[in-house]
Amino acid sequence: MTTLNPNPNPNPTPTVVLVHGAFSDATGWIGVIAELRSSGIPVIAPPNPLRGLTWDAAHLASVLAQLDGPAVLVGHAYGGALITVAGTAENVVALVYVAAYIPQEGETLDRLQAGFPPSPLTGHLKEWTYPLRDGDSAVEVTIEVTAFPSVFAADVPENVAAALAAAQRPLATAAFTEPASAAAWRTKPSWALVAGADRTIDPDLQRSGATRAGATTVELPNTSHAAPLSEPTRVAALIRDAVRATTATRGGTRRRR
């Protein structure tokens, strides 16, 4: 016979789901994972397919559907667009953006970026092709290896930046042209970290998105795009804030304009 717990915990600690962005993989969260685990916070860092906003958000939604209990979604860079769409899942209680895109519903990343000066990333993308199942091909991009340290990871040790450049995961260009089907920040509380020395996503673009989302925001003025690697303690502190706030006030959704 199964015995039900007569006093279940009404506010279990959310699982933090870390979503990496383009040109990297989940190992970029290694320092953040260590920090969160040291605080007793459950955490996972699933792979991001990097095949396009619709596909990638659906993949993330499938991960969320298989979790027990609430989740705090954390997105770095392009991962911010994914948590914006997939974050409408019922068990998502908060969103945390780290040097990230924060699109509006119906907005593409190309359109979002059009309102700001091109970042140094734009001139240092290398195109590749990959096969599709129907026999056609599509385009994906990486950062030129020689430009990667200065564009993506200027505050990361040189040997680490070189290894990251060699191990890049390409992003399908479809990611820039597919519109966001939802904007979870309209109904979920949000936090944001702005990387003030980011040369991949313009810091003003990050600030604008955070303001539009009504996010609780911190800024690290000298931090590169690789904030999860270079500033894991600061990134983890912001995530802890989101976990604590949503654990203490669980029970409803935030009203949005």
Image (cartoon, rainbow, N blue to C red):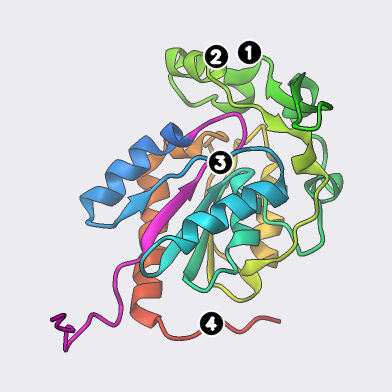
Kind of residue at disc 2: Ala
Q: Give the range drawn in magenta.
A: 1-25
Q: Is the magenta stretch mostly helix, strand or loop?
A: loop
Q: Distance between the residues labelled 2 and 4?
A: 43 Å
Q: Which mark is residue 48?
A: 3
Q: Name the residue under label 4.
A: 253
Kind of residue at disc 4: Thr
Say which label, 4 or 1, has the lower sequence index: 1
Q: In which quarter of the image is residue 2?
A: bottom left
Q: Please, is residue 227 above or below residue 234 in the view?
A: above
| Number of other residues with Cα within 10 Å of mark 4, as a class: few under 14, some 14 to 19, many 20 or more | few
Q: Name the residue under label 1.
A: 145
Say which label, 3 or 2, has the lower sequence index: 3
Kind of residue at disc 1: Val
Say which label, 2 or 4, has the lower sequence index: 2
Q: Which mark is residue 167?
A: none
Q: Nearer the viewer, residue 212 or 36?
A: 36
Q: Distance between the residues labelled 4 and 1?
A: 44 Å
Q: Where in the figure is residue 177, as x and y percent of width and height?
A: 83, 45
Q: Which residue is drawn at 66% across and 54% down?
A: 207
Outermost bottom residue: 6
Q: How far apart are marks 1 and 3 (CA)?
A: 21 Å
Residue 46 painted magenta: no
| Numbered disc in front, either 1 or 3 | 3
Q: Which residue is drawn at 61% across and 43% down?
A: 77
